[in-house]
Image (cartoon, grey):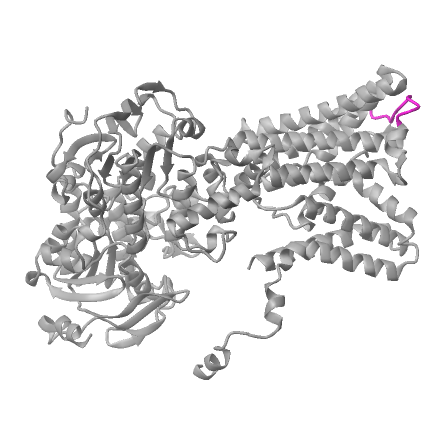
Amino acid sequence: MSIQTKILAPPPQSPFSKLARFPWGTYAPLIALLVLVIFSAIASEHFLIPRNLTNVLRQVSYTGIIALGMTFVIIAGGIDLSVGSMVALVGVLCVMLLNWFGDGWYAVAMAIAAAVAIGALLGALNGLIITRGKVASFIATLATMSILRSLTLYVSDAGEVVSENQLFPEIGGGYLLAIPIPVWVFGVLAIISHILLKHTAFGRHVCAVGCNATVASYSAIKVRWVYFMTFVIAGAMVGISSVMLSSRLNSVSPGDAGLFYELDAIAAVVIGGTALAGGRGTIFGTVIGVIILGIINNMLNLLGVSPYLQGTVKGLVILVAVLAQFKGDR
Amino acid sequence: MSSENSLANKNHATATPIMQIDNIVKEFSGVRVLHKVTIDIFPGEVLGILGENGAGKSTLLKILCGIYQKTSGSISFAGNKVEIDGPASAKALGISMIPQEFNLINTLNVFENIFLGSERSQGILLDKKAMRVKTLQLLEELQTQLDPDALISTLSVAQKQMVEIAKALVSDVRVLIMDEPTTVLTAHEVKILFALVERLKARGVTLVFISHKLKEVKQLCDRLVILRDGYLISVDDVSDIDEQDMARKMVGRELNQIYPPKISCAAETVLKVSNLNIKGLLQDINFKLHKGEILGFAGLIGAGRTETAEALMGLREVDSCSVQVKGRDVAIKSVADAVDCKMAYLSEDRQGKGLVMNFDIVKNISLISLAKYVKRLIQGKLETQQAQHYVDLFDIKAASINSELINLSGGNQQKVYLAKWMDTEPEILILDEPTRGIDVNTKKEIYHFINAMTKKGMSVIVISSELDELIGLASRVLVMREGKIVGELQGDDINDQEIMYYAAGLKQDLTKSA
């Protein structure tokens, strides 16, 4: 044994030691994305065509916007499973209101404002149940997930709700400087979210609450308020996403809209390096996570992989991301 | 060290030691906390281990129970070299420890706890009858009247301790280690415990007893080991050493070297607390704090000192309380309110309640006072500059100002904690066990800093279980017991004996506290 110790004794002073000190954990999602892009470019000639790329970005922007809100919730130590059902309910109500408001841009503007407000309100409802009722966020949003989906079906009588406004599809289907509007919205919201998380007192408090709520409360932070607000933000984001999605399709189908969005959003957040236990995470990571998921979906389509297997691949990617995180922690 | 070895064996030249601790060294990430400690323990004796906090007592005993692994040295048990590589192997040898915080499961009853991990069974079913009978037998032996079916949560602290002892006896204990068993007991319960120790001795059990209380040690032990800063200082027969010697050997230096000279405070009252009540915890707490004063709060664990501080900071719901800060009535409902009143509170639980361990130094320091650094957005530069100011002021040692707190030593964490609250510019500072688990040097720095701040007019409340700290720092000490202030000491009255008399309920002076 003593011989072994002698051999092991000198600390590793190789040129690789610098490499080992590089914060791999921070950049892992970005590196994974680059590798994926290179691989995709080689594997399919269609991948790098601008039209394909903008399509990928448009597809991911709906869940991406939701994932931005989810990032706040998860960093604060919670989870929101109700976002998918919320997309459907807000979408249905939004289109119904739009039809009630009539034609023209005024009606569109009012419907969008209403959608964001309803989303924030539903988020506030989640937040109230969780902070005032002291119900674990997993359970509370599991319940509202079921309630909101059922209300959606009831309100719409389980039938597709179609917009009668001619201008509405312009929002989700339109382009600005050759980039789809939802992508712009996603980008702008990502920047706002990043600033909110990293450069405001609120964002700092969200991280503190997620790290250790007791320490936060002993540090004069309004823990319940901060936690509550993360759900409101998540709800508002759902509202915006819902507008993008329903205007793209010009209709909402109450049974399918937003189905499994909560899983995609959570997966994107986790792939982006945010700890599911709370306390640390970045918006930048979430954006990368969202795009990784989008490219994987796109590639599976381009390569003609059975759509039934796509879930398997997505699941494996999530597992790898989480395992990599755990390694980084040790 | 050979002289101590011979000293250790003086009166036991003929007996064979049950345990021989030979040149034990323990290092934590390169820092040596035990320096070649050599002790022989003889069967049937009561061996006392004395030392200040951080002297290495607990580390040594945790090595004996297999909780920590020694870095080098050897341990022999009953003449054979043994490797105690985990609690299970200590248990197999018959070494048991009764920790300060009991390891009992509150939702189980007495006999279930006693047999936890060594359940008797008949086939696949538990043999509850046998366990009850054996429990009754053990409790009788301990001369304790307890219902084997009583839930642990319904027992008093002393009764829980009896259950712990019974639990040790069930597994045929040969060496029983007790970590400060009397701190949580009343004077009467201490007497019962002492009688029990005699009976255990008669059974041939060897006892190792850690304590801070010199008198108890003198009364109870046969021999005394004194540790200081990880070194074995002496092993004496208890008849050869008096309390002064013990204190001198434990401290190893004059007390006035660590503590700054006390300064007199102004007559102005900055904080007046009256009629503070929390049902079941605090009863009619009244006191005043003067400008520039260091007011000590003494008392046993659970006497209500932390609860008082937390109530003042708006962290606990109170049944009644009126607080005046600088003559103005204030209602403190939250920590934010307390911060507005220029009050600060450093919790005893630094890691659990004080600091965000995954945040760096900068973010921890600015956490409460963040508004100062926000002009629309957080001004990172300003924030870092201010943190650097504190790092220099307190001489905080870390790889970088962006090091996460988890990578700092306890002493440096405490300095960050202090900086965090100093950044709110408090006038009233409440320190709860400010030097727990901190090395002597950092302690000294913190004491001198507190002193310097009182000179600038800050008023300080120090809650401490280390009597030396209160005696060395405070110009006035309030003693709490069972949720009440039972005594007030000033000047030369602030000494070990007076404080303990009040804390243990031997003396009570309710009129003074008003």
Which of B178 and A287 lies nearest the eye of the viewer? A287
Residue shown at the point (37%, 40%) measured from the top left: B347
Residue A72 relative to residue A183: left or right: left
Residue B85 in the image: x percent, y percent? 38, 68
A186 versus B43 height, above or below: above
Q: Tell me which corner region of the image, top left, top right, bottom left or bottom right, holds residue B279.
A: top left
Which of B428 and B425 lies nearest the eye of the viewer? B425
Residue B291 in the image: x percent, y percent? 26, 30
Which of B407 and B66 lies nearest the eye of the viewer? B407
Residue B99 visible in the picture: yes
Q: Tell me which corner region of the image, top left, top right, bottom left or bottom right, holds residue B58.
A: bottom left
Residue A87 in the image: x percent, y percent? 76, 31
Q: Is residue A167 magenta?
A: yes
Which of B418 and B82 lies nearest the eye of the viewer? B418
Residue B286 visible in the picture: no
Residue A196 in the image: x percent, y percent? 64, 36
A95 versus A317 height, above or below: above
Which quarter of the figure is the C terminus of chain A placed in?
A: bottom right
Which quarter of the figure is the N terminus of chain A placed in?
A: bottom left
Farthest residue in the left direction? B239
Residue A24 relative to residue B301: left or right: right
Farthest residue in the bottom direction? A3
Residue shown at the point (77%, 33%) measured from the top left: A241
Q: Is residue A185 magenta?
A: no
| Chief secondary structure of the magenta portion | loop
Which region of the structure is painted magenta? A156-168
Residue shown at the point (87%, 27%) measured from the top left: A160
